[in-house]
Image: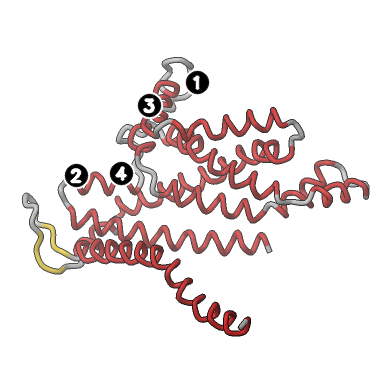
Amino acid sequence: MADAAAAGAQRRSPALGLALLAPSAAMLAVFAIALGALFQFSLLEFIPGSLRTGGLTDRNFRGVLAPLYLRYIWDTVVLSALTTAFTLAASYPVAYALARTPSARVRSLLLVLTLAPFFTGAIVRTYAWMLVLGNSFVRWPVKLLFEPEGVLVGLVHFSMPTMILILAAAISHIDPGYERAAASLGARPWRVFWRVTLPLSTPGIVSGSLVVFAWTFSAFPTPELLGGGRVKMIANVVKDLALDSFNWPGSAAFAVVALAVTLGLLVLMGRLLGRGAA
Protein backbone atom coordinates (compact mmCIF):
# COMPACT_ATOMS: atom_id res chain seq x y z
CA MET A 1 0.00 0.00 0.00
CA ALA A 2 2.78 2.42 0.97
CA ASP A 3 4.79 1.52 -2.15
CA ALA A 4 1.74 2.16 -4.35
CA ALA A 5 1.16 5.55 -2.71
CA ALA A 6 4.81 6.48 -3.20
CA ALA A 7 4.68 5.47 -6.86
CA GLY A 8 1.53 7.53 -7.34
CA ALA A 9 3.18 10.55 -5.71
CA GLN A 10 6.19 10.20 -8.03
CA ARG A 11 3.89 10.09 -11.05
CA ARG A 12 2.04 13.20 -9.89
CA SER A 13 5.15 15.24 -9.09
CA PRO A 14 6.16 15.99 -12.73
CA ALA A 15 2.61 17.05 -13.55
CA LEU A 16 2.52 19.25 -10.44
CA GLY A 17 5.86 20.82 -11.38
CA LEU A 18 4.64 21.61 -14.89
CA ALA A 19 1.46 23.14 -13.47
CA LEU A 20 3.49 25.38 -11.16
CA LEU A 21 5.70 26.47 -14.06
CA ALA A 22 2.76 27.25 -16.33
CA PRO A 23 2.26 30.91 -15.21
CA SER A 24 5.95 31.68 -15.59
CA ALA A 25 6.06 29.99 -18.98
CA ALA A 26 3.02 32.00 -20.11
CA MET A 27 4.66 35.28 -19.06
CA LEU A 28 7.88 34.33 -20.85
CA ALA A 29 5.86 33.55 -23.97
CA VAL A 30 4.18 36.98 -23.80
CA PHE A 31 7.55 38.71 -23.44
CA ALA A 32 8.99 36.67 -26.31
CA ILE A 33 6.07 37.65 -28.56
CA ALA A 34 6.47 41.31 -27.60
CA LEU A 35 10.21 41.25 -28.33
CA GLY A 36 9.55 39.51 -31.63
CA ALA A 37 7.04 42.20 -32.61
CA LEU A 38 9.53 44.91 -31.60
CA PHE A 39 12.27 43.35 -33.74
CA GLN A 40 9.89 42.94 -36.68
CA PHE A 41 8.83 46.60 -36.43
CA SER A 42 12.48 47.71 -36.35
CA LEU A 43 12.97 46.21 -39.81
CA LEU A 44 10.19 48.24 -41.44
CA GLU A 45 10.88 51.37 -43.47
CA PHE A 46 10.09 54.73 -41.91
CA ILE A 47 8.07 57.06 -44.14
CA PRO A 48 8.50 60.71 -42.99
CA GLY A 49 5.22 62.52 -42.44
CA SER A 50 3.23 59.30 -42.23
CA LEU A 51 2.39 56.86 -39.47
CA ARG A 52 2.41 54.03 -41.97
CA THR A 53 5.52 51.96 -42.58
CA GLY A 54 7.07 50.64 -45.75
CA GLY A 55 8.79 47.38 -46.62
CA LEU A 56 11.68 45.60 -44.98
CA THR A 57 14.93 47.54 -44.63
CA ASP A 58 18.07 47.70 -42.51
CA ARG A 59 18.21 51.50 -42.73
CA ASN A 60 16.88 51.89 -39.19
CA PHE A 61 19.80 50.00 -37.67
CA ARG A 62 22.30 51.88 -39.81
CA GLY A 63 20.69 55.10 -38.61
CA VAL A 64 20.81 54.32 -34.90
CA LEU A 65 24.45 53.23 -35.19
CA ALA A 66 25.43 56.75 -36.22
CA PRO A 67 27.98 58.54 -33.98
CA LEU A 68 25.27 60.70 -32.38
CA TYR A 69 23.26 57.73 -31.11
CA LEU A 70 26.37 55.77 -30.17
CA ARG A 71 27.33 58.72 -27.97
CA TYR A 72 23.98 58.45 -26.18
CA ILE A 73 24.62 54.75 -25.59
CA TRP A 74 28.09 55.51 -24.26
CA ASP A 75 26.75 58.23 -21.95
CA THR A 76 24.19 55.76 -20.62
CA VAL A 77 26.90 53.17 -19.96
CA VAL A 78 29.06 55.71 -18.11
CA LEU A 79 26.18 57.04 -16.00
CA SER A 80 25.01 53.51 -15.17
CA ALA A 81 28.52 52.42 -14.13
CA LEU A 82 29.05 55.53 -12.00
CA THR A 83 25.63 55.12 -10.41
CA THR A 84 26.40 51.51 -9.53
CA ALA A 85 29.78 52.39 -8.00
CA PHE A 86 28.53 55.36 -5.96
CA THR A 87 25.40 53.50 -4.86
CA LEU A 88 27.49 50.58 -3.63
CA ALA A 89 29.86 52.87 -1.74
CA ALA A 90 27.03 54.85 -0.13
CA SER A 91 24.82 51.84 0.65
CA TYR A 92 27.31 49.43 2.20
CA PRO A 93 27.77 51.30 5.52
CA VAL A 94 24.00 51.64 5.95
CA ALA A 95 23.46 47.98 5.09
CA TYR A 96 26.22 46.91 7.49
CA ALA A 97 24.66 48.96 10.29
CA LEU A 98 21.22 47.56 9.47
CA ALA A 99 22.51 43.98 9.65
CA ARG A 100 24.97 44.27 12.54
CA THR A 101 23.69 46.90 14.99
CA PRO A 102 22.54 45.27 18.26
CA SER A 103 19.88 47.92 18.91
CA ALA A 104 16.45 46.92 17.67
CA ARG A 105 15.38 50.57 17.77
CA VAL A 106 18.22 51.63 15.47
CA ARG A 107 17.49 48.75 13.10
CA SER A 108 13.84 49.75 12.92
CA LEU A 109 14.76 53.39 12.25
CA LEU A 110 17.21 52.43 9.49
CA LEU A 111 14.66 50.09 7.93
CA VAL A 112 11.96 52.77 7.95
CA LEU A 113 14.31 55.32 6.39
CA THR A 114 15.34 52.78 3.76
CA LEU A 115 11.78 51.84 2.82
CA ALA A 116 10.37 55.39 2.96
CA PRO A 117 11.34 56.29 -0.65
CA PHE A 118 9.24 53.37 -1.92
CA PHE A 119 6.09 55.10 -0.63
CA THR A 120 6.53 58.12 -2.91
CA GLY A 121 6.39 58.06 -6.69
CA ALA A 122 9.44 58.51 -8.87
CA ILE A 123 8.01 61.71 -10.37
CA VAL A 124 7.43 63.27 -6.95
CA ARG A 125 10.95 62.45 -5.80
CA THR A 126 12.42 63.76 -9.05
CA TYR A 127 10.59 67.09 -8.71
CA ALA A 128 11.85 67.32 -5.14
CA TRP A 129 15.40 66.86 -6.39
CA MET A 130 14.79 69.55 -9.01
CA LEU A 131 14.01 71.99 -6.19
CA VAL A 132 17.05 70.92 -4.18
CA LEU A 133 19.54 70.89 -7.06
CA GLY A 134 18.18 74.08 -8.63
CA ASN A 135 19.56 76.38 -5.89
CA SER A 136 16.07 76.91 -4.48
CA PHE A 137 17.01 75.81 -0.96
CA VAL A 138 20.75 75.12 -1.17
CA ARG A 139 23.31 77.27 -2.95
CA TRP A 140 25.62 74.83 -4.72
CA PRO A 141 29.10 75.98 -5.78
CA VAL A 142 28.62 74.31 -9.17
CA LYS A 143 25.55 73.92 -11.36
CA LEU A 144 23.86 70.56 -10.83
CA LEU A 145 20.39 70.87 -12.34
CA PHE A 146 20.21 69.90 -16.02
CA GLU A 147 23.74 68.52 -15.80
CA PRO A 148 25.06 64.92 -15.76
CA GLU A 149 26.17 65.38 -12.14
CA GLY A 150 22.62 66.20 -11.07
CA VAL A 151 21.23 63.20 -12.92
CA LEU A 152 23.85 61.05 -11.19
CA VAL A 153 22.73 62.31 -7.78
CA GLY A 154 19.11 61.45 -8.55
CA LEU A 155 19.97 57.99 -9.88
CA VAL A 156 22.07 57.16 -6.82
CA HIS A 157 19.29 58.28 -4.50
CA PHE A 158 16.71 56.13 -6.28
CA SER A 159 19.02 53.10 -6.37
CA MET A 160 20.14 53.14 -2.75
CA PRO A 161 17.07 51.52 -1.08
CA THR A 162 17.27 48.46 -3.33
CA MET A 163 21.03 48.14 -2.90
CA ILE A 164 20.76 48.54 0.89
CA LEU A 165 18.18 45.77 1.21
CA ILE A 166 20.18 43.36 -0.96
CA LEU A 167 23.44 44.05 0.88
CA ALA A 168 21.81 43.86 4.31
CA ALA A 169 20.36 40.44 3.45
CA ALA A 170 23.78 39.21 2.35
CA ILE A 171 25.59 40.58 5.42
CA SER A 172 23.00 39.19 7.82
CA HIS A 173 23.68 35.69 6.48
CA ILE A 174 27.37 35.92 7.43
CA ASP A 175 28.07 34.01 10.63
CA PRO A 176 29.41 36.53 13.19
CA GLY A 177 31.58 33.70 14.53
CA TYR A 178 33.94 34.17 11.59
CA GLU A 179 34.48 37.81 12.52
CA ARG A 180 34.95 36.95 16.20
CA ALA A 181 37.44 34.24 15.28
CA ALA A 182 39.49 36.66 13.18
CA ALA A 183 39.42 39.25 15.97
CA SER A 184 40.49 36.65 18.55
CA LEU A 185 43.53 35.86 16.38
CA GLY A 186 44.66 39.47 16.60
CA ALA A 187 43.14 41.03 13.48
CA ARG A 188 42.21 44.68 13.78
CA PRO A 189 38.58 45.69 13.02
CA TRP A 190 39.43 47.10 9.59
CA ARG A 191 41.33 43.91 8.73
CA VAL A 192 38.41 41.75 9.90
CA PHE A 193 36.13 43.71 7.63
CA TRP A 194 38.51 43.64 4.66
CA ARG A 195 39.50 39.97 4.89
CA VAL A 196 36.31 38.39 6.28
CA THR A 197 33.14 40.47 6.04
CA LEU A 198 33.66 42.05 2.62
CA PRO A 199 34.60 38.82 0.78
CA LEU A 200 31.73 36.88 2.35
CA SER A 201 29.28 39.61 1.30
CA THR A 202 30.39 39.42 -2.35
CA PRO A 203 27.20 37.60 -3.49
CA GLY A 204 25.15 40.56 -2.27
CA ILE A 205 27.53 43.01 -3.94
CA VAL A 206 27.24 41.14 -7.24
CA SER A 207 23.44 40.89 -7.07
CA GLY A 208 22.95 44.49 -6.01
CA SER A 209 25.33 45.82 -8.67
CA LEU A 210 23.62 43.90 -11.45
CA VAL A 211 20.16 45.06 -10.34
CA VAL A 212 21.19 48.70 -10.02
CA PHE A 213 23.08 48.71 -13.33
CA ALA A 214 20.17 47.13 -15.21
CA TRP A 215 17.65 49.53 -13.66
CA THR A 216 19.79 52.61 -14.31
CA PHE A 217 20.42 51.58 -17.91
CA SER A 218 16.69 51.82 -18.60
CA ALA A 219 15.92 54.81 -16.35
CA PHE A 220 13.57 57.38 -17.87
CA PRO A 221 11.96 59.96 -15.51
CA THR A 222 15.16 60.88 -13.65
CA PRO A 223 17.28 61.85 -16.69
CA GLU A 224 14.22 63.29 -18.41
CA LEU A 225 13.45 65.77 -15.62
CA LEU A 226 16.81 66.32 -13.93
CA GLY A 227 18.55 66.37 -17.30
CA GLY A 228 16.11 68.89 -18.78
CA GLY A 229 16.62 67.57 -22.30
CA ARG A 230 20.38 68.18 -22.12
CA VAL A 231 21.27 64.79 -20.62
CA LYS A 232 20.06 61.95 -22.84
CA MET A 233 19.95 58.32 -21.86
CA ILE A 234 18.67 55.41 -23.93
CA ALA A 235 15.06 55.55 -22.71
CA ASN A 236 14.89 59.28 -23.44
CA VAL A 237 16.17 58.79 -26.99
CA VAL A 238 13.61 56.04 -27.60
CA LYS A 239 10.88 58.40 -26.42
CA ASP A 240 12.13 61.24 -28.61
CA LEU A 241 12.21 59.06 -31.71
CA ALA A 242 8.77 57.56 -31.08
CA LEU A 243 6.73 60.49 -29.73
CA ASP A 244 8.54 63.57 -31.01
CA SER A 245 9.71 62.43 -34.45
CA PHE A 246 7.03 59.72 -34.87
CA ASN A 247 9.81 57.48 -36.14
CA TRP A 248 8.44 54.28 -34.66
CA PRO A 249 10.67 51.92 -36.67
CA GLY A 250 13.77 53.91 -35.71
CA SER A 251 12.68 53.91 -32.09
CA ALA A 252 12.17 50.15 -32.21
CA ALA A 253 15.60 49.67 -33.80
CA PHE A 254 17.26 51.79 -31.12
CA ALA A 255 15.42 49.83 -28.42
CA VAL A 256 16.63 46.53 -29.91
CA VAL A 257 20.23 47.78 -30.03
CA ALA A 258 19.96 49.08 -26.47
CA LEU A 259 18.54 45.75 -25.28
CA ALA A 260 21.40 43.86 -26.92
CA VAL A 261 23.96 46.20 -25.32
CA THR A 262 22.26 45.83 -21.93
CA LEU A 263 22.29 42.03 -22.05
CA GLY A 264 25.90 41.98 -23.21
CA LEU A 265 27.04 44.32 -20.43
CA LEU A 266 25.09 42.39 -17.78
CA VAL A 267 26.70 39.12 -18.90
CA LEU A 268 30.14 40.77 -18.86
CA MET A 269 29.55 42.31 -15.42
CA GLY A 270 28.24 39.01 -14.07
CA ARG A 271 31.36 37.17 -15.23
CA LEU A 272 33.77 39.81 -13.95
CA LEU A 273 32.05 40.09 -10.58
CA GLY A 274 31.71 36.32 -10.41
CA ARG A 275 35.45 35.91 -10.90
CA GLY A 276 36.06 38.45 -8.19
CA ALA A 277 33.76 36.55 -5.86
CA ALA A 278 35.53 33.28 -6.65
In terms of image quadrants, where is residue 221? top left
- What amino acid type should be assigned to the residue bearing mark 4? Asn
Q: Residue at 74%, 35% (x, y): give it.
A: 101
The 10 Å Cα crowd at callout 2, few under 14, some 14 to 19, many 20 or more, is few
Q: Is residue 4 above or below residue 27?
A: below
Work out how far the residue at label 1 is from the one at label 4, CA to CA, in angstroms.
28 Å
Badge 4 element: helix
Number of the label disc, if any, that sits on residue 236: 4
Distance in Å between CA atoms under marks 1 and 3: 21 Å
Whether tag 2 and tag 3 are in contact, CB under 8 A, the answer is no
Mark 2 lies on residue: 243
- Residue 161 spot, x, y in % from top left: 54, 38
Q: Earlier in the sequence, mark 1 or mark 4?
A: 1
Disc number for residue 178: none
Mark 3 lies on residue: 127
Residue under the point 52% across and 54% down: 210
Residue 98 x %, y %: 67, 37
Amino acid type at circle 3 is: Tyr
Q: CA distance from mark 3 to mark 4?
A: 17 Å
Task: Identify residue type, mark 2.
Answer: Leu
Marks 1 and 4 in Cβ contact (< 8 Å): no
226 or 3: nearer the viewer:
3
Q: Mark 1 or mark 3: name the one nearer the start of the chain.
A: 3
**Cα gap from disc 2 to disc 4, whole angstroms:** 10 Å
- SS of the residue under disc 1: loop
**Which residue in the protein does label 1 denote?**
141
Q: Residue at x 51, y 81 (%)?
A: 11
**Which comes sooner in the sequence, label 3 or label 4?**
3
Label located before the other in sequence (2 or 1): 1
Label 2 or label 3, whichever comes before in sequence order: 3
